[in-house]
Amino acid sequence: MKKSVVVILTFLILSSLVLAANETIQERASSCLDSKINDKCSTLTLEQQAFSVMSGNTECKSSLKDLGKDNECWPTSSCKIKDTSLAILALKQTGDNTDKAEEWILSKKKSPSNIEFYLEIEIPTASLSECTLSYDSVSKRITIAEDRTISGEPGSCFSLAYDNYWLKVRESCLTKNFTVSCNKDFISTILYKKTNSNVWHVSSDVQSASQSGQTSHEINAYCFSASSACNYEENLWAALAMKDESLSPLLPYLISLADDNKELFPSTFLYLFTNSEEYLSDMLALQKSDSSWDLKNKGKFYDTALAILALPDSEAENNAKSWLGEIQGADGCWNNGNIRDTGMLLWAGWPESSGGGGGSDIARCTDYSYYCISQGECDEAGGNKLGNFYCSSPQICCDTPKKQKTCDEQGGEICTSEETCDESEISASDTESCCMGSCIPIKSECELAGNSCNSVCTDNEQENSVLDCNTGICCEPKSSSLWIWILIILIILAILGIIFRNKLRLFIFKLRGGVSSQTVTKTRPPFPPATPQIRQGMRPQIMQRPVLRQQSRAKPDTELEDTLKKLREMSK
């Protein structure tokens, strides 16, 4: 009976281990998040609850809604733009209506006071032209010279700027509609920049008209703020959460101040909004060697989640997911069980975990052969947003697939079979491996060994048929016969030195001024002195070296003294 119990337990343990090994990264993370959240929603922050719902765990949905003020803004005590935006993103995942919350954010519009706007009028033929500016039922005439400088009186809403090449729009006139008409074919557009900055941006509102035709511009730019000033991070999340019609007016503020807020990783958001290669290149350049992102502000898991969100179905995303799989905690979570980071990574990297609209009546976009892509990709493809279909936020349902650009259009390069890319690769319409860095030659076996690949070897080289070259033949330097003979001689001398080492020592001793070999033979005893035997009970005799002087003093000549004594007596 005991044996059968042991067998059953062993089988169960092995089965659980096999199942654990077969679990995907997503399944392990979801299971960990479920255990962390279990009956603890009321103790979690609003951000933790929002990202857990966005990841597909709806346990905290009710608790999250309770934190809001009548589903209008979050939190109840002090409504904030970012918290309300996170709540909108989370509730959209579950198919809840967020119109009231979006209307509350739209009611918090403010004019961005630190951005300047300019009107540019370009005459392609570079000839003397006259144009008319119309606004507020007023028309003002200006002249554009051949060198493109502007003269005249543009009216109260404009002032000549930058050596009279552009017209600066006064802040009080930003919401007005401007009509431009010229007596030559022309192009007009709106430029903008942050105050005191030298970086200029061209809006997407570029229009052209023929002679006597007209263009019309309205600078509809704002940011959102529930206090006195706009906060950049709040507006990033608001742009992600809001409907597409409110996105364009936010872009001048978000684009102009991006360089001042690099720690917030704005290129991820801006790439989602504009699909611009500039922001794509920025993201790829910031990817670490281990395939993560870390801008030292929110942490590497937060930043990696943002990058994955902006780069779906890319090599950079796949590499980042592989890294996440390698460092995933034993419990399945990331960053030591961090609920926010684990939920955010699931939302960004595995959007299918969020379900198909949380069981709502909204149909899945892809089930009807439409496309879940970013707003910027839909706009670029000339598609239309379909509001009655579900896509995992921040993607929208578009009736047109995203426009696949060539590698060259994306600012990349196609490497040859003999080259490798030194940075990330992305897909393009003409290749699956578009290098966003530089194509560098792949070193052959021959070159890795320090040799060179040439069509013909020089007189100082010889062909190496063992090592391969990508092109040509492998040429290595010829070995010098002089060095070979020197090496052989040194080996022979070393062997002779070992064989005759004793004679060599004696020869060296002579050179240093030592005694002759004969003297050494005479003074050296043939055998070592015998060790005296010591018998038991007898005291050993100690043989002392004779001291002649001491012995002569110890035994004086008495006869000589007697004779001398007698001679002294006779002399008296």
Image: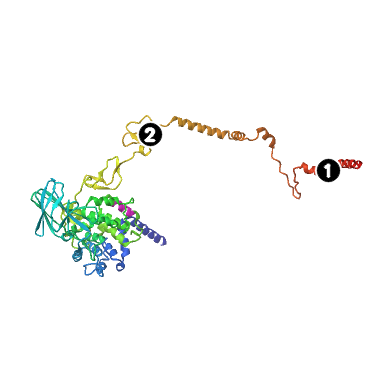
Three-letter amino acid code at the position of disc 1:
Pro
Question: Counting other residues with Cα less than 10 Å from the Cα at mark 1, is it few (<14), some (14-19), or many (20 or more)?
Answer: few
Secondary structure category for the residue under label 2? strand
Quarter-wise, where is residue 529 in the image?
top right
> Residue 257's x, y, as percent?
25, 57
Q: Which residue is mark 1?
A: 556
User: Which quadrant is home to the C terminus?
Assistant: top right
Quarter-wise, where is residue 26 in the image?
bottom left
Marks 1 and 2: in contact by CB < 8 Å? no
318 part of magenta stretch: yes
Q: Is residue 498 above or below residue 250?
A: above
Range covered by the magenta-colored residues = 317-325
In the rendered image, the residue lying farthest to the left is: 212
Q: Magenta region's main secondary structure?
A: helix
> Residue 494's x, y, as percent?
53, 34
Three-letter amino acid code at the position of disc 2:
Glu
Question: Counting other residues with Cα less than 10 Å from the Cα at mark 2, is it few (<14), some (14-19), or many (20 or more)?
Answer: many
Answer with mark 2 or mark 1, whichever residue precedes in sequence. Answer: 2
Q: Using residue 306 as the reference point, say whether residue 512 is left or right of it.
A: right
Q: Is residue 430 above or below residue 453?
A: below
Quarter-wise, where is residue 376 in the image?
bottom left
Camera-nearest residue between 417 and 190: 190
> Residue 283's x, y, as percent?
27, 52
Camera-nearest residue between 4 and 499: 499
Camera-nearest residue between 276 and 399: 276
524 part of magenta stretch: no
User: Which quadrant is home to the N terminus?
Assistant: bottom left
Q: Using residue 246 as the reference point, say whether residue 478 is left or right of it.
A: right
State whether residue 205 appears in this view: no
Q: Which residue is mark 2?
A: 476
Question: Any mark on residue 180, and which?
Answer: none
